[in-house]
Image (tube, helix red, strand yellow):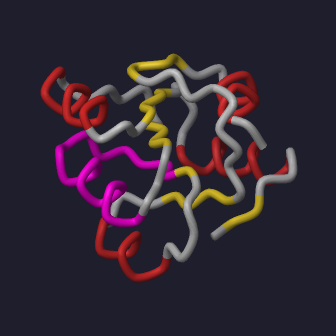
Amino acid sequence: MKVNEIISLLDAEVLCGDAFETEIGSAFGSDMMSDVLAYVNEQGLLLTGLCNPQVVRTAEMMDISCICFVRGKKPDESVVALAAEKNIMLIATKRCMYSACGELYKAGLEGN
């Protein structure tokens, strides 16, 4: 699934990045970055409600190309700038994590 399809499915807002055609093979939803480090095994989409720099740093370590902030949360400008520097696309949706993950799964995006 391409990032632009994810944006459309989740009615998400783009916060930074322009990798709309990037292919995303899986998704992982968590507010615990330790779980992301322990369980993510392929590049994909991270859904989270955390809006701190550690989210971007974790995504960088795990080669995650796109982060979707759920529950209407948006990171501050320093987090957006860090993501832009690391070439990680940021999007935000008003959906809760459960709903966002369910919608992506229903559309065919596998879990990680």
Q: Is residue 20 above or below residue 41?
A: above
Instruction: Tell whether position 53 is magenta.
Output: yes
Which x, y percent locates residue 53?
17, 45
Which x, y percent locates residue 17?
44, 24
Q: What's drawn in magenta, residue-wise?
A: 46-62
Q: How many marks?
A: 0
The quarter of the picture where the N terminus appears is top right
The residue drawn where x is 56% and y is 50% is 45
Q: Nearer the viewer, residue 98 or 21?
A: 21
The quarter of the picture where the C terminus appears is bottom right
Which x, y percent locates residue 79?
20, 33
Q: Nearer the viewer, residue 58 or 101?
A: 58
Looking at the image, residue 112 sits to the left or right of residue 17; the answer is right
Instruction: Tell whether position 81 is magenta.
Output: no
The residue drawn where x is 49% and y is 42% is 66
Looking at the image, residue 47 sits to the left or right of residue 80; the answer is right
Looking at the image, residue 44 sits to the left or right of residue 62; the answer is right
The residue drawn where x is 67% and y is 59% is 26
Determine which quarter of the picture holds residue 78: top left
The residue drawn where x is 29% and y is 41% is 86
Which x, y percent locates residue 94?
52, 25
Determine which quarter of the picture holds residue 52: top left
Which residue sits furthest left? Answer: 78
Q: Nearer the viewer, residue 36 or 62?
A: 62
